[in-house]
Image (cartoon, grey):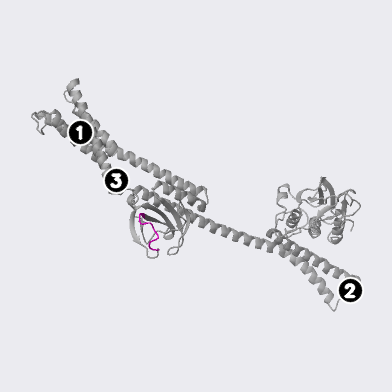
Amino acid sequence: MEPIAGRRLRRAALASVAGAGALAATTVAVGLLEGSVGVGNASATYLLAVVAMAVAFGIPAAVATAIGSFVLYDLVFIQPTGLLAVADPEEWLNLLLLLVLGVVVGQLAGMQRARAEAALLRERQARALYRIGRALATNPTGAALGEVVRVLAGETAATRAWIALGPPGGAERVTADSGGDGRAAVGAAHQVLRRQPGDEPPAWVRVHDPRAAAGTADAHVEAYRVPISVGREERGSLWITRPRSAGRPGRGDSRVLAAAADQVGQALERDRLAEEATSAEVARRSEAAKTALLDSVSHDLRTPLGSIRAAAGSLMDPAFDGAPAARVERAATIDREAERLNRLVSNLLDLSRIEAGDLRARPEPFALEDLVAAGLERLAAALAGRPVTVTMPDDLPPVNVDPVFIDQVLANLLENAAVHAAPGAAVRVGAVEAAPGVVRLTVEDGGPGVPDAALGGLFRKFSRVARGGPDRRGSGLGLAVVKGLVEAMGGRVAARRAGIGGLAIDVDLPAAPFPPRGDAGAEPPGVGA
């Protein structure tokens, strides 16, 4: 690009040629008006040339044209012609009015042109800042920085623009670059934008950074740096490069760069605050989960432990002289409560595996009636006093399930029914083929039930719904574990009102595929076991 002085000389030469041409054309027009048309004084026609030069080249060109009009009209049309002399005093007045009006009109037209250019510049800068602000507001900051540097490179006539982030005094890392290889090699000397107090425009100051590698920058390119700061803390830099011949960025470009750096700084601060808020929310939820876990589990832990200690203490008491049946009863109490503790600990472990995504089902075909029968046998003590009905068709296909998972699912469902159904309330277990390849297992209880509005939240961990029945507290883990284990086996679980008054849990399990032809007489593993 040509030097600034050369461009100024070229513009001045162009203005001189245009002014000479305008004056010549206007002189011809004045001669025609006064000679052929018969106009007495057509000197005002020169004002057209003044206005044209003001609009095209500004106030200096307009003033020069006004002076040239004054001289030309005196030389060509005022007697004696060819001399800068005026015989008639009235002609002096006309010439002076022409000069004054020419200068005033030229200045006014030039000022209007300058205002129009300033308005266009402000509009362009406003559009650029709008694009930058919109990119930062509607995109993650990291993705928006690429749009920011592209806008700045185009609006400030920069050969390259980039944003480098890093701690003050440390090595900055380029995070967005409109061109180049991503390295901020700018040489030892560059220009830094210094903010001024109040409404004063920012100023560029040349600085020398001894940490930069000498000779890494292009000798024909000047680098300009705008610090990205939030308060008194510096977060990085906004850089542009321009040809040395283009000079420093103008006042408008400097303000755009300063405003863009401020917007980037605010976006970085917003991201930091959002990250802190997220961390605080995670910590709060973690603490709430721990509190809920302790609150939910503490009662269920203390109750069986209290029963175990009471039964063991009576057996250990030297004064106890109970019959063998009494000793067996206390031993059974210890075994039953220990099993209850084991189920609670298993639920906790299963829940942690579910949340960690570590569950891996190993499905095998099993007859569902056999699995239900085994589960009822293990939970016989918990279901004591409650009439249990099992309804399953003879042609029910086997289910393809993980034996460990389905055993825990049945235990949790039956225990949930026992906990929330008072002694004497019915418990019903049934299964049907709900759809081709799907077997639906349903466990219902005759307890007080659950409000319809609470059915959707039953499978969340630590979810406990106030019921109208006996005051039995649960850990709020059983149904959450059921949902995780069933989904790990490829099934689904849902809750609804039971036909016998309480809660019904529907578990959809995948049916086992039929054996291939030639093995029809073979019985799938686990079936009939």
Q: In this view, does 325 lie to the left or right of 312?
A: right
- Tally of marks: 3
Is 85 placed above or below 352 here? above
Q: Earlier in the sequence, mark 3 or mark 2?
A: 3
The amino acid sitting under disc 1 is Leu
The amino acid sitting under disc 3 is Arg
- Viewer-nearest of labels 3 and 2? 3
In the image, 110 versus 453, the foreground residue is 110
Residue range highlighted in magenta:
213-221
Q: How crowded is the residue under tag 1: few (<14 C-alpha within 10 Å), some, or many (20+)?
A: some
Q: What element carries label 1?
A: helix
Q: How far apart are marks 2 and 1 (CA)?
A: 130 Å
Residue 101's tag is: 1
Q: How far apart are marks 3 and 2 (CA)?
A: 116 Å
Q: Quadrant of the C terminus?
A: bottom right
Q: Tell me the chief SS of the magenta region.
A: loop
Q: Image point 52% across, 49% down: which residue?
A: 139
Residue 205: x, y in percent? Answer: 33, 57
Residue 322's tag is: 2
Q: Which of marks 2 and 1 is nearer the N terminus?
A: 1
Q: Do the residues labelled 1 and 3 touch (CB within 8 Å)?
A: no
Residue 196: x, y in percent? Answer: 34, 55
Indicate the quadrant where residue 13 lies: top left
In the image, 10 versus 461, the foreground residue is 10
Q: In this view, does 47 lie to the left or right of 350?
A: left
Q: Earlier in the sequence, mark 1 or mark 3?
A: 3
